[in-house]
Amino acid sequence: MDSIKNSFKSRIKNLMTRNKQLDSQIKDDDSTAEKSALKDEKDKNNDELRQVRCQRFQQEQFNEDVAYIKQCCQYLQRLGLVKSSHQFSREFLNKSQHYLSMIICENRKPSPNTIYNLIQNLSQVYDMFMDYDNKQSINRTLLQMMDKGNALITKRILECYRVYNGINHRIS
C-alpha cells in the first residue's frame, strides 16, 4: 500500500513542479502563440493533477472502508460471534461468503449499503448484549463501531454530492 501512496505523492509532486516551470516560462515568453501552447499544456497538467488527487482520495477511502470492515470482523471474532471472514460476510454484511476477501484482493470499495447492513447487524448485537453484566465495554465498542460506520456512509454521500455538483474541495 505504501508504494501506491508514494506513487501518487511522486506523481503529484512532478505535476506541481511542471506547473511551476510552465508558469515561469509563460512569464518569460513574449510570443503569444508559445504562451497559448504553454497555457494549454498547463491546463492539461492541471486536469491530470485533479485526476491523480481524486485517485489518491479514492485509494485512501478504500483503505478506510476496508479497514473498518476488517476491524468489525476481528472484534466479532474475539466476541465469538463469528468464526471466519466467510461467516462474517454472510451474516453481518449480508453478502456472499467470499465478499470480504474479494473486496480486499480486487481493491474494491464496499458499497454504502454494505456498510449500512453491517451497522444494522451490529445494532442487533448491541441489543443482545444489553442483558449481560460486562455489557458496558462491549456496547461502548459496538457504539463506536456503529458511529464510525455512519461517519463513513455520510462521508461517501457528501463526496458523491460534491462530485455531482462539481464542487472542487475535498470533504474531510
Image (spheres, rainbow, N blue to C red):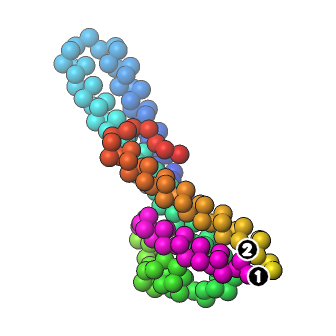
Give the alpha-carbon distance from disc 2 to disc 1, as whole Å: 10 Å
Q: Is residue 39 magenta?
A: no
Between 111 and 46, the residue placed more toward the observer is 111
- Which residue is situated farthest in the left direction here? 33
Q: Which residue is mark 2?
A: 138
Give the amino acid at mark 1.
Answer: Tyr
Position of residue 7 measured from the top left corner of the image (x, y, whole percent): 46, 51
Position of residue 162 measured from the top left corner of the image (x, y, whole percent): 39, 44
**Disc with the residue nearer the chain's start (2 vs 1):** 1
Circles 2, 1 touching at the beta carbon (< 8 Å): yes
Would you place residue 118 above or below residue 164 in this image? below
Q: Which residue is mark 1?
A: 132
Position of residue 149 measured from the top left corner of the image (x, y, whole percent): 55, 63
Quadrant hosting residue 20: top left
Residue 50 visible in the displayed image? yes
- Which residue is situated farthest in the top direction here? 30
Q: Which residues are magenta?
A: 108-132
Between 59 and 111, the residue placed more toward the observer is 111
- Give the structural element (helix, strand or loop) at label 2: helix
Q: Which numbered mark, 2 or 1, is in the foreground of this view?
A: 1
Name the residue at 37% across, 38% down: 167
Name the residue at 55% across, 76% down: 121
Q: Is residue 131 magenta?
A: yes
Name the residue at 45% across, 71% down: 114
Residue 61 visible in the displayed image? no
Between 73 and 21, the residue placed more toward the observer is 73
Name the residue at 42% across, 83% down: 96
Quadrant hosting residue 71: bottom right
Give the amino acid at mark 2.
Answer: Ile
